[in-house]
Amino acid sequence: MSWKIKMHLNSLVFLCLSSFTLLLLSIWSLNVSSVNIIEWEFISLNSCSIVVSLIFDWMSLMFLSFVFFISAMVLFYSGDYMLGDLNFNRFMYLVLCFVASMAALIVSPNLISILLGWDGLGLVSYALVIYYSNEKSANAGMLTVLSNRVGDVAILLSIALMFNIGGWNFYFYTSYLENGGLGTILKFLVVLAAMTKSAQIPFSAWLPAAMAAPTPVSSLVHSSTLVTAGVYLLIRFSGAINGSQAQSFLLIISCLTMFMAGLGANFEYDLKKIIALSTLSQLGVMISILSLGFADLAFFHLLSHALFKALLFMCAGVIIHNVKEYQDIRCMGGLVEFMPLTSMCMNLANLALCGMPFLAGFYSKDMILEVAFMSKINLISFILYALATGLTVCYTFRLIYYSLSGNFNLGGLSFIADNSVVMTSPMLGLSAGAIMGGCFLSWLIFPEPYMICMSLEFKTLPLLVSGLGGFIGYMLNIMSVNFNLKSLGSYSSVVVMGSMWFMPFLSTFSLNLYSLKMSYLILKSGDGGWSEFYGGQGVYKFIVNNSSYLQIFQDNSVKIFMKVFMIWFIILFFIIY
């Protein structure tokens, strides 16, 4: 057995055992209401202590348990998915660094130590997005890292502002942050950082672009690590955000994000980008319910979503491997006949995403919708909630039709089968989580149920909207494929709805256009203009012109010698007399 395989197996065993141990500790901590904070003080500077803090409460322990479990499944899955890669060892190290960065962020109640995990996530995600070393990956990686740098700067400014409070442990200072002045600026910076990491409008363009990374990375990033870091930071700061103006701002931004992502996924044909847009939509759901003051519900949906979204990406990776590395769903179809196990797992993840009763997504999504409908939200937010719920089911059934149950669109010599035990085994483990994870977490986190009081119309609205969305998503695509229907709207409207409201262009082209124009003018009038005239080229011409005179003196001409002699003779004559 090679040392690479040994390292792979050791990592798997360590992560699985750690996940199980942390889950038991989380249940114990939840039952006894225990919060343990460990601090190492480095230096005390004018009554401001610089310390490294670690927090171990039920929330951090449970989140760590889920991160380690999904990471173990992803590493096991990668053993076959990345088997032929020449840099397999480097890939494994990067994934483990990614998990370590997320773990550092989860257990840190201190903004300085959070920055280590926060920046680690950004750096390693950039290395993973550009892993395949082509132009598309390089562009996607640059967009990802520069978008996340905005949040990094916000965290750095928050650290500078919290110096006035006397420490960076926000777990102790949420009551101060509720006040105006400095607290308002700090809350704005924290919200800005969370918006960039969780890809809310206007920072949404990087999340679908990050699909240039290998599929196991997408499974890990879009389920429980990078994109959830912003939501987790807001959950930790929820005590300060509640009752502030940041709540209403977050509500409208998150509702617009989940509507925009659901709309864009219905016009997308890239399999991984459809799943990425569904992640963006669910992040909007988490932040929207958090902005209404229900941080526990946001955390509940964060965990249940992690299980079925990791499963969905794994199924997508198996399908992409089998269909000759195509990601266009129009090149698939009829896969349920050839890949029954993968199709079953994918349908399970899709139905959990839609909120099918008694699957993982149902327990969190249904409760979120009911609590949101009971809350004091405006009409626009209510309509966006309903539309986003219907659009989720619509693009899910569209994906099912194009990839699993539609017409077979591959070549006749294609070999498609569930022949990889290494890739299907972790999918079965996550399938169990997608089935039982929701009810398990519901009983664990909410031992006393919420009191839901609403009319029959509001109670049945999510089911009605979901059923209507599924019918439209499936039947409309059958009709468009079988009868060659053109688009229902104009070309311009389809482009607007299917391009994330031009956000990729606004995030790249519009920002670069002004800077590139200015840099061209500076290059033309500066480096290529006056600075060249008086700089390098000017000095060169001056030296060349004057060197010609020196050359004349070196030609040994009698005329030159006689002229010099006469000049010196005249000068000496005037000096003497």
Image (cartoon, rainbow, N blue to C red):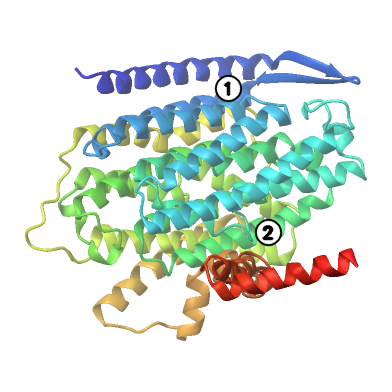
Residue 218: where, in percent of width, then height? 41, 45
Residue 94's mark? none
Determine whether the residue tagged by mark 1 lies in a helix, strand or loop: helix
Q: Residue at x 60, y 48 (%)?
A: 148
Q: Which residue is mark 1?
A: 61
How many neighbours does mark 1 have within 10 angstroms: few (below 14), some (14-19), or many (20 or more)? Answer: many
Q: Which residue is mark 2?
A: 253
Determine whether the residue tagged by mark 2 lies in a helix, strand or loop: helix
Using the image as rendered, state which of residue 417 and residue 354 is in the foreground.
417
Using the image as rendered, state which of residue 2 and residue 540 is in the foreground.
540
As drawn, is 187 to the left or to the right of 236? Answer: right
Q: Tell me which amino acid carries mark 1.
A: Leu
**Is residue 16 at all visible to an observer of this figure?**
yes
Q: Quadrant of the N terminus?
A: top left
Q: Residue at x 28, y 82 (%)?
A: 484
Residue 232: where, in percent of width, then height? 63, 37
Disc nearer the start of the sequence (2/1): 1
Using the image as rendered, state which of residue 244 and residue 6 is in the foreground.
6
Q: Residue at x 42, y 21 (%)?
A: 15
Name above or below for residue 501 compared with residue 449: below
Q: Residue at x 52, y 18 (%)?
A: 22
As drawn, is 166 to the left or to the right of 207? Answer: right
Using the image as rendered, state which of residue 357 and residue 132 is in the foreground.
132
Name above or below for residue 68 compared with residue 248: above
